[in-house]
Amino acid sequence: MDTALADRLLPWYREHRRDLSFRRTRDPYAILVAEVLLQRTRIASGLPYFERFMAAFPTVVDLAAAPEERVLKAWEGLGFYGRARNLHRAAKAVVADHGGRIPGTFARLRELPGIGDYTAGAVASIAFGERVPAVDGNAIRVLARVFRLRGDLTRGDARRGLVGIAADLVPPGEPGTFNQALMELGATVCRPRAPRCPECPLRDLCGAFRDGQPERYPEIPPRPPTPVIRVAFALAQRGGNVLLIRRPEGGLLAGLWALPGGEVGGKRDAGAVLRAALSGLGGGARVDGIAGRVEHTFSHRRWEGVVYRVRISGPLGSREDATWAGPADLERLPLVPFHRRFLERLHGPEEH
DNA sequence: AAGACGGGGCC
DNA sequence: GGCCCAGTCTT
């Protein structure tokens, strides 16, 4: 074990740690919720969701008993919705298999859905004091710079080597504090760009600082260009209601309610896409004009397309994944965020 | 080992 | 407009 980093990091952390709400609790459930919610998510973005989520589901028993619709609704707008569904499943497993107590070891936490190496390490160390590392993107960056580690540290042997180094650095006394300190340093001092090396408690240990090139680390593999996907959606209105379809369990935006439609491509033109999306809905649908356009950039793709006004005759038939949603329903249903914004603009002050 | 999976903030 | 973020799961 090497405590040189911990010896510098822990005093620095006691002085400079930010006062964040999820750090004020010792409740393992709250810590677990925070860690899942912050996966690949900036703290500033996730914090309001953490407050609302804990107010809506104060205990793991409350979460396990909640309908999935409420859980997804609490997650609406945050992204990576599989996290919400997995967290819900994890809560059910905790109630069913662990007597309603969050498992207290890395190995048991790791078995829960949606809990990987990072989250299991974070909860085990922070909530239960187990001496295990928690290597997130911040820790990767700090350790890459201190030890001048090359290669893509998010996967493969490079990843395993890094986790081994991190494990060796965790002090037995307060592993959770050390892990948080490492992440805090990465977030506030050892930043991706323009790191504040003069303020860093590790600078005399840091290989990248010694070289004068901290921003060279970690290496980020190049990514292919963002593809543009053509899409077509249907806006069908009846009275004050809008036709929504619940997206399938797997894949993109799983389980959220959306305008009917999808990707245009290959031999499927917009008309074919809309017919497929609206199949089985009443007596027929015909396009009645254009309601607006969609432009939405995901992390690695861009959706561009048209929202068509569509007239539907007859009832919805037997499709349980379709509903005419009124204003009250829109407050209750978890909705694809950019479709929600589209609908809000539609009824906004700039009505054309 | 490689892709899929969101969204917002920042340069 | 591209990069990055308190990662995990599937294939």
Image (tube, coloured by chain):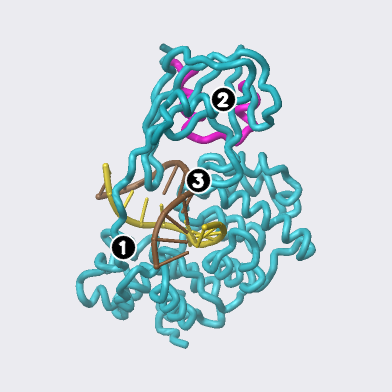
Chain colours: A cyan, B brown, C yellow
Q: Which residue is mark 2?
A: A278
Q: Which stretch did the figure color magenta?
A: A326-349
**What residue sits 51% from the left and 15% below the top?**
A286
Question: Would residue A344 be found to the left or right of residue A300 on screen?
Answer: right
What is the spatial separation of the Cα atoms under label 2 and label 3, in whole angstroms? 26 Å
Q: Earlier in the sequence, mark 3 or mark 1?
A: 3
Q: Position of residue A119 (x, y in %)?
A: 55, 64
| Residue A256 part of the magenta segment | no
Q: Earlier in the sequence, mark 2 or mark 3?
A: 3
| Residue A340 part of the magenta segment | yes
Q: Position of residue A136 (x, y in %)?
A: 45, 65
Q: Residues within 10 Å of mark 3 (few under 14, many from 20)?
A: some
Looking at the picture, do discs 2 and 3 lie on one chain? yes
Looking at the picture, do discs 1 and 2 lie on one chain? yes
**Viewer-nearest residue: A219 or B4:** B4
The correct choice, above or below, for A303 with respect to A201 in the image is above
Q: Which residue is mark 1?
A: A220
Instruction: Report helix, strand or loop for mark 3.
Output: loop
**What residue sits 34% from the left and 65% below the top?**
A190
User: Can you see residue A14?
Assistant: no
Contact between marks 1 and 2 (CB within 8 A): the answer is: no
Q: Which residue is mark 3?
A: A79
Q: Position of residue A60 (x, y in %)?
A: 71, 55
